[in-house]
Amino acid sequence: MTRFDAATESERLALFADAAAAHRARSSDVMTVDVDPDSDVTDGGEVPPWIQLAGTELVMDCTDDELDRLKGLLAEFPEFRIDELVTPEEAEGTNAVVTARSDANRVAGFIERAFREVYGLDATYKAWVTAV
């Protein structure tokens, strides 16, 4: 991979798909997508939203409202399902583990829609692939 950030939907979809394919080809531990702090309009705290891909699992932190929106989004991705929800006592939210048994393009589409629909980011948000 030669590029690691994108700020339009088509660029982000290509970036996420390329990163997911590279992650799988390398059998790396994790691929991480972070939202540029300057693009974070979620008012979710100090850390902008992030999504990790670990093999066939997508991992993301959600507030209760975000978790409800995630469940709604999953209705449109029947090959994806929530496998685990962890809510630590000391945390404000839930860590969701979603099994994503699909190709890199479908994973990319899910990540894009999760950032836009689950986290409520603007169409012009900038994302970084910080680990592949």
Image: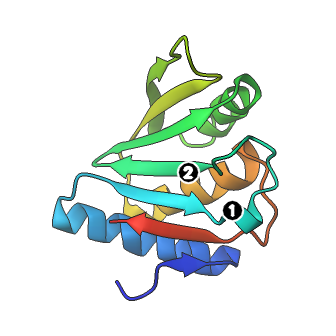
Secondary structure under tag 1 reads helix
- Residue that badge 2 annotates: 50
Q: Residue furthest bottom?
A: 2
Quadrant occupied by the N terminus: bottom left
Residue placed most toward the observer, 112 or 37:
37
User: Few, some or many C-alpha atoms within 10 Å of disc 1 (few <14, some 14-19, many ≥20)?
Assistant: some
Q: Is residue 122 left or right of residue 115?
A: right
Residue found 55% across the figure and 51% down from its top: 50
Q: Is residue 11 left or right of residue 125?
A: left
Real-space CA distance between mark 2 and mark 1, rounded to the nearest whole angstrom: 11 Å
On screen, residue 97 above or below 32: above
On screen, residue 66 above or below 12: above
**Residue 55 coordinates in the image, percent (x, y):** 27, 48
**Mark before the other along the chain sequence, 2 or 1:** 1
Q: Is residue 12 left or right of residue 29?
A: right
User: Few, some or many C-alpha atoms within 10 Å of disc 2 (few <14, some 14-19, many ≥20)?
Assistant: many
Q: Residue furthest top?
A: 89
Q: Which mark is residue 93?
A: none
Secondary structure under tag 2 reads strand
Residue found 55% across the figure and 78% down from its top: 5
On screen, residue 23 above or below 83: below
* Quadrant housing residue 35: bottom right
Q: Which mark is residue 37?
A: 1
**Residue 27 coordinates in the image, percent (x, y):** 17, 59
Residue placed most toward the observer, 21 or 1:
1
Residue found 45% across the figure and 35% down from its top: 98
**Residue 4 coordinates in the image, percent (x, y):** 47, 79
